[in-house]
Image (tube, rainbow, N blue to C red):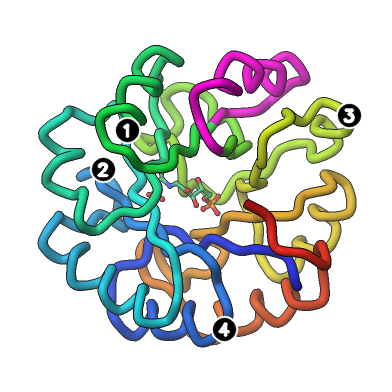
Amino acid sequence: MSLEVKICGLASPNVIDAAGKNGARWAGFVFFPPSPRYVDARLAIDLAAIARSHGMETVGVYVNPTDRLLDETAPAVDWIQLHGQETPERAQAIRAQSGKRLIKALPIAEAADVEAARTYEAVVDMILFDAKVQPGTTRLPGGNGRTFDWTLLEGRTPSLPWMLSGGLDADNLAQAVLESGAKRVDVSSGLEDAPGLKSLDKIAQFMNHARTLGPKEQTP
Ligand SMILES: O=C(O)c1ccccc1NCC(=O)[C@H](O)[C@H](O)COP(=O)(O)O
């Protein structure tokens, strides 16, 4: 079993085919209109069918979602990824109401940011550590291609499954896994030729590297 990979911001059938054929576990759909990777519920439902035909699980990526958005997109989504300022209480309510598995994204710049994972341990199924961005430098809380100090995760990771993200690409993946100890990674802009435009070659190259890394057993 190689490193488990989520490819985020998938928005067209050929890119989903490439992700699936190359062995990605998760296909991420971004439900945040300002993103260049935004997909609406209708498109996501069609794309989810393709992803599932490859055996992939789908992840809906949300920023402080309303219940209405969660309901509309529910058929397209196996996992819910919360990428905004959702509190543990809100995460718990979404999990109870949706019956889906939850990922909470946490922005990381220093050791104290990693400790925030503890407050979500009882109410989500996975933590995603992403790079913290400077306020005012981007409209997006994710998908910015920025890395953080991966060694911050050393000895501080939560007891539940977690995933590494933030500025990963085929060139830095091995180092990121070595320094962080990650068994699962999430990647988006490092596989693009332009914002929102995934490259089939970059997907294949990244997945080839991922196959040489990671744990020997599948995780929950
Ligand atoms: O990708 C987006 O446009 C996005 C917008 C709003 C919230 C989250 C978003 N992406 C979330 C992801 O899971 C990304 O894969 C993650 O942030 C890493 O992105 P990158 O640094 O580009 O690899």
Q: For the residue labelled by badge 3, is the local secondary structure a helix, a strand or a loop? A: loop
In primary-sequence order, the first of circles 4 and 2 is 4
Location of residue 213 (image quadrant) = bottom right
* Mark 1 CB near ligand 1 (8 Å cut): yes
**Alpha carbon distance from label 3 to label 1:** 29 Å
Q: On the picture, is 85 further left or further right than 68?
A: right
Would you name the residue on which mark 2 appears? 32
Q: Foreground residue, 215 or 200?
A: 215
Relative vertical location of residue 117 with respect to residue 146 in this rendering, above or below: above
Residue 63 image label: 1
Would you name the residue on which mark 4 appears? 22
In primary-sequence order, the first of circles 1 and 2 is 2
Q: Quadrant of the N terminus?
A: bottom right
Point out the frontmost of discs 3 and 1: 3
In primary-sequence order, the first of circles 3 and 4 is 4
Q: For the residue labelled by badge 4, is the local secondary structure a helix, a strand or a loop? A: loop
Q: Mark 4: which amino acid? A: Asn
* Residue 81 among magenta residues: no
Percent of width and height locating residue 74: 21, 49
The range drawn in magenta is 106-125
* Label 3 crowd (10 A; few <14 / some 14-19 / many >=20): few
**Alpha carbon distance from label 4 to label 2:** 26 Å
**Alpha carbon distance from label 4 to label 1:** 28 Å
Relative vertical location of residue 163 with respect to residue 83 in this rendering, above or below: below
Residue at point 56%, 51% (across, down): 145
